[in-house]
Image (cartoon, rainbow, N blue to C red):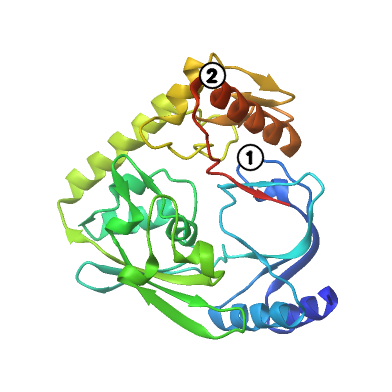
Amino acid sequence: MNFDKIYSLAVELGCKAEYGVPMRDYTTFKTGGAARLMITPNSDESLSKVIEACNDEGIKPLILGNGSNMLVSDNGLDNVVINMCRPNAEIRELSDGIIECDAGVTMSKLCNFALEKGLTGLEFAFGIPGTAGGAAYMNAGAYGGEMKDVLFSCSHIEPDGSIGELSDSELQLGYRTSAYEKNGFVITKLRLSLKKGNSEEIRAKMYELLKRRKDKQPLEFPSAGSTFKRPEGYFAGSLIEECGLKGKSIGGAQVSEKHAGFIINKGGATSEDILNLIEFVKDTVKREKGVTLEPEVRLIK
């Protein structure tokens, strides 16, 4: 695997390319060792060429959005990390109610754009800490809404650098999953269908939901949001609390005392601390409640 070749290509294309980048600076858990090489493409065209080069070298790059749903190994990553959060990421309204955005746009920016245009349907997503691409990848949702309610197509780049698109049922949007989790393609653009609404009502709903987040979730500490997927027929946080695990700590990692569904970095946590606490919680809930918890957080080695 020729990392220098990929680095040189990225620089030639005008992309930002860096060796030895600490992943703790790019994840919301604020943990993780260094990435061998990080590239921030400046366009979809350069992204396509970098992905094709990685494929030619037998490298499956890690695609990074806002780092809000991943736990990266303390040992770092012997890999190419492609940072989708490029400074020139754009949002545009194509026609009445139809929005297109680059995958690296943050959800907060996307929601505010919809508000400015007087478009309703994305209020549920205000406060989700990731990017639009990440939200599509996992069909992110909150407060009764999901990306599948508004998302109707995505453009992507395949490992050989070719460009394609999935739409409607091809997206296979399910609970915290999509076709992109299975096919390994890199989402570059999203198109969403929203409805005309009253700007003041949209704003009020957005900030009502944000207040609920702040009141109930430990946003003052680094975390990856909800640590576990919702088991069918249960709520992960309730199961964990019923097992008496609120406040349980391993190293600097803690089951939040505010919301048991969150594992937080209370200060100085390592990824190993967090992973060990995840496993402890899973084992305890399985033993005491007979329910298997599945992490929503992606474990990256």
Decide: few, some or many residues near mark 1? Use Cα within 10 Å; few <14, some 14-19, many ≥20: many
Q: Position of residue 118 (x, y in %)?
A: 21, 57
Q: Position of residue 281 (x, y in %)?
A: 60, 26
Q: Residue placed farthest to the top in the image? A: 244
Decide: few, some or many residues near mark 2? Use Cα within 10 Å; few <14, some 14-19, many ≥20: few
- Identify which residue is drawn at 46% across, 26% down: 237
Separation of residues labelled 1 and 2 (CA atoms): 28 Å
For residue 173, side relative to residue 80 (left or right) = left
Question: Depth check: 75 or 8 in front?
Answer: 75
Question: Judging from the image, what secondary structure is the residue with disc 1 in?
Answer: loop
Question: Judging from the image, what secondary structure is the residue with disc 2 in?
Answer: helix
- In the figure, 257 relative to 228: above or below? above
- Identify which residue is drawn at 52% across, 43% down: 296
Which residue lies under the disc numbered 1? 29
Res 21 label: none
Res 288 label: 2
- In the figure, 82 relative to 257: above or below? below
Going by the numbered disc 1, the residue's amino acid type is Phe
Q: Position of residue 227 (x, y in %)?
A: 54, 37
Mark count: 2
Q: Where is residue 140 in the image (x, y as percent from the top left)?
A: 41, 50
| Earlier-in-chain disc, 1 versus 2 | 1
